[in-house]
Image: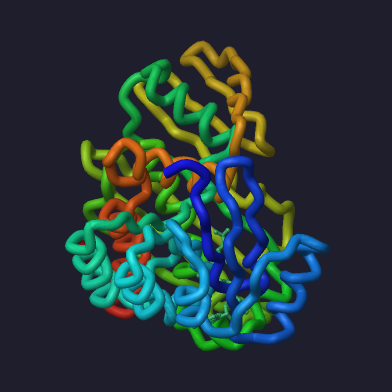
């Protein structure tokens, strides 16, 4: 693949237009005329074909990769249609609305001969990459305890889009999936059980519960203590949260995007932020291009991402059953 051609489907609130030197935007698609027009406006005078129907876009445009930024309830059908048309697919998180459907999608992707990646943009920033390098250097020894705090007052318009308003445990499914994926990435381990409760304080303005507490056990005996809130009333954390990874020889702490190592004698050493040529979705796209060239699955391919999504789905099960759920 030389300069890969992409079709972007979905130009809503998160549907920003990609432009990188490695890819050429071949078409944009949205069934909502206003959102399509806004995207066209963003593109300025670039003559990118715009469609309301992705089947028409597929007929008239040759593309290698589809970037799908539509609501999770639409992901399965669009993924299947793109794979059938011979495209690799980058899907926004979460995989779908439901666990069984997500497992089915991973199976379809596996048999398609093409790659399906779930974009996990939170992994690809200079703080997380710096922390990952420190963890992998084994500087704090064996990690067995983790504390994670996420707190933001999410009054953004996106909270009130109809499909989000109707989503059961929206905060867990839409937001916590990022944090759970980061835990797996940093620890290099999968979760084995979870106990979760969600809460609905009187100031909650969302249609579903606005905060979640969870105890998550990971492989190799790591215990994670998580609290997340979309209806915060205090100091805001960064989007990836505040966290402490605690090991036998010290801790790695990340508050306000200044990660540091704290040794047993209490001394602190700042971890230099990673130097990254590409972050977020641009990194995901770059990894997809390389996976195609090298004939390997993308790092966050759908089969891998099922493990992150399973933590969310089992958390919902735990909330309903009011007990710890083993995977
Ligand atoms: N990774 C992140 O940081 C992040 C942030 C926000 C949202 N997201 C994810 O991005 C996805 C979209 O979220 P959003 O906030 O942009 O939603 P949105 O509702 O604002 O936009 C979705 C767009 O998709 C269009 N659409 C739906 N079905 C379509 C179809 N069959 N063909 C063409 N267009 C179609 C809609 O018309 C709409 O314009 C979701 O999966 C969400 O979880 C990811």
- Compared with 182, 86 (above or below) is below
The answer, for residue 317, to whether it is visible in the render is no
**Residue 238 at x, y percent in the picture:** 66, 48
Instruction: Say whether residue 149 is left or right of residue 247.
Output: right
Q: Residue at x 59, y 25 (%)?
A: 274
In which quadrant is the C terminus drawn?
bottom left
Front residue of 172 and 109? 109
Front residue of 115 and 267? 115
Front residue of 169 and 112? 112
Res 196 quadrant in image: bottom left
**Residue 12 at x, y percent in the picture:** 65, 74
In which quadrant is the N terminus drawn?
top left
Q: Residue at x 36, y 55 (%)?
A: 215
Q: Residue at x 62, y 20 (%)?
A: 272
Q: Quadrant of ligand 1?
A: bottom right
**Residue 50 at x, y percent in the picture:** 65, 75
**Residue 286 at x, y percent in the picture:** 49, 42
The answer, for residue 255, to whether it is visible in the render is yes
Instruction: Say whether residue 41 is left or right of residue 287.
Output: right
Instruction: Say whether residue 35 is left or right of residue 102.
Output: right
């Amino acid at each position: 693949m030389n300069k890969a051609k992409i079709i972007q489907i979905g130009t809503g609130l998160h549907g920003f237009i990609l432009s990188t030197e490695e890819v050429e935007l071949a078409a944009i698609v949205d069934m909502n005329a206003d959102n399509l027009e806004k995207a066209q406006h963003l593109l300025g005078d670039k003559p990118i074909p715009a469609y309301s129907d992705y089947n028409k876009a597929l007929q008239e445009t040759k593309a290698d990769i589809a970037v799908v930024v539509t609501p999770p309830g639409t992901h399965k059908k669009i993924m299947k249609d793109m794979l059938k048309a011979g495209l690799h697919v980058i899907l926004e998180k979460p995989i779908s609305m439901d666990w069984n459907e997500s497992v089915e999608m991973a199976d379809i992707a596996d048999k398609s001969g093409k790659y399906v990646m779930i974009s996990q943009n939170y992994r690809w920033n200079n703080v997380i990459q710096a922390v990952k390098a420190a963890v992998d250097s084994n500087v704090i020894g064996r990690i067995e305890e983790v504390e994670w705090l996420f707190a933001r007052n999410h009054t953004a318009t996106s909270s009130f889009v109809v499909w989000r308003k109707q989503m059961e445990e929206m905060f867990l499914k839409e937001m916590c999936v990022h944090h759970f994926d980061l835990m797996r990435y940093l620890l290099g381990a999968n979760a084995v059980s979870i106990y979760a409760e969600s809460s609905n304080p009187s100031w909650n303005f969302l249609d579903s519960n606005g905060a979640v507490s969870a105890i998550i056990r990971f492989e190799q005996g790591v215990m994670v203590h998580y609290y997340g809130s979309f209806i915060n009333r205090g100091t805001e954390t960064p989007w990836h949260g505040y966290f402490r990874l605690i090991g036998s020889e010290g801790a790695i702490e990340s508050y306000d995007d200044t990660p540091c190592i704290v040794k047993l004698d209490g001394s602190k050493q700042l971890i230099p932020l990673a130097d990254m040529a590409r972050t977020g979705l641009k990194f995901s796209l770059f990894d997809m291009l390389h996976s195609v060239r090298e004939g390997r699955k993308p790092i966050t391919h759908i089969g891998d991402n099922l493990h992150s999504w399973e933590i969310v789905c089992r958390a919902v099960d735990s909330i309903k059953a009011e007990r710890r759920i083993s995977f």
